[in-house]
Amino acid sequence: MVKCKSNLPMKQVISDYQFTNMSLEKIGLKYGVSDKTIRNILIEAGIQLDKYTYKYLTNQEIKKAYVPNVKWDYKKAEEDYLNGVTLKEIARRYGVRNPCSITAVMCKLGHKPRGFKMSKQAKDLPLDLIISEYQSGMSTKALEEKYGVNNNTIRRRLIKAGVQLRKTWERGISKEDKRAVLVEIFGEDTAKGLIEEHGLKGSS
């Protein structure tokens, strides 16, 4: 005879799930109920289900069962997420280094993933001016600070426009300093050819 959920020994059911290797199906067979009934009992008792159980849950059940193991206020972040606040802004508000962590938690809470919203600053970037400033010697870091966008945004726009990015050792270093580095490493005779090859003659 199938038992009613209210007649089940709650503590024993929870103990079977938490301290044995019994699956929901096996626990259900033990007490004469379905695995879904066992699952609902555990959720109502506030038991966090393991990741292998999530595939059987609806979005609402996932939200009820999942408790994120994070230090930031995921409940307030969830409100912001549902109100359309960008992932980058949510990460900034709650001190999360990687916005992808926000997406991961929101998905486990049963929400649909969404991409990054492009900021107004990124949409309105004066690309021709940025290219000119970069080619005149400004670093991508300086451009990032000037235009209020991410460094990677600047780099992607430059690359897409066909601009060859400077090598790390070339960024923010005068021609005079570059010549000095080459002389120190290769000696004066060898450095002469390298200086000419890299167009480092003349004033800095």
Image: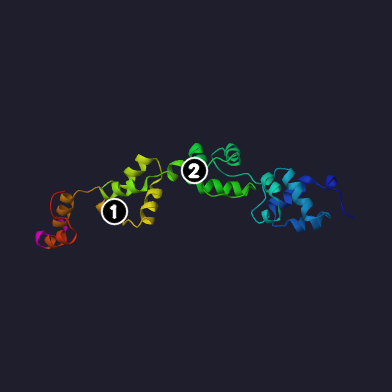
Q: Which region is colored magenta?
A: 184-189
Helix or strand or loop: what does disc 2 sit on? helix
- Please name the residue shown 38% across and 47% down the image: 151
Location of residue 186 by image quarter: bottom left
Q: Which mark is residue 168?
A: 1
Location of residue 142 by image quarter: top left
Q: Give the quadrant of the N terminus.
A: bottom right
Q: Where is residue 193? Give x, y as percent.
A: 13, 63
63 shown above or below 26: above
Q: Where is residue 78? Give x, y as percent.
A: 60, 40
Three-letter code, disc 2: Lys
Q: Where is residue 89? Give x, y as percent.
A: 50, 40
**Is 157 on the left-hand or right-hand side of 173?**
right
- Please name the residue shown 43% across and 41% down the image: 121
Q: Where is residue 67? Give x, y as percent.
A: 63, 44
71 or 83, which is in the foreground?
83
Helix or strand or loop: what does disc 1 sit on? helix
17 shown above or below 121: below
Other residues around mark 1 within 10 Å, as few (<14) / some (14–19) / many (≥20): few
183 shown above or below 151: below
- Please name the residue shown 33% across and 44% down the image: 143
Asked whether the beta carbons under mark 1 and mark 2 sit within 8 Å of each other, the answer is no
Q: Which mark is residue 64?
A: none
Residue on which disc 2 sits: 88
202 drawn magenta:
no
Instruction: Look at the image and name its color scheme.
Output: rainbow
**Is 190 on the left-hand or right-hand side of 15?**
left
10 or 71, which is in the foreground?
71
Q: Main secondary structure of the magenta part?
A: helix
142 or 100, which is in the foreground?
142
**Is 115 on the left-hand or right-hand side of 34?**
left
Q: CA distance from mark 1 to mark 2?
A: 27 Å
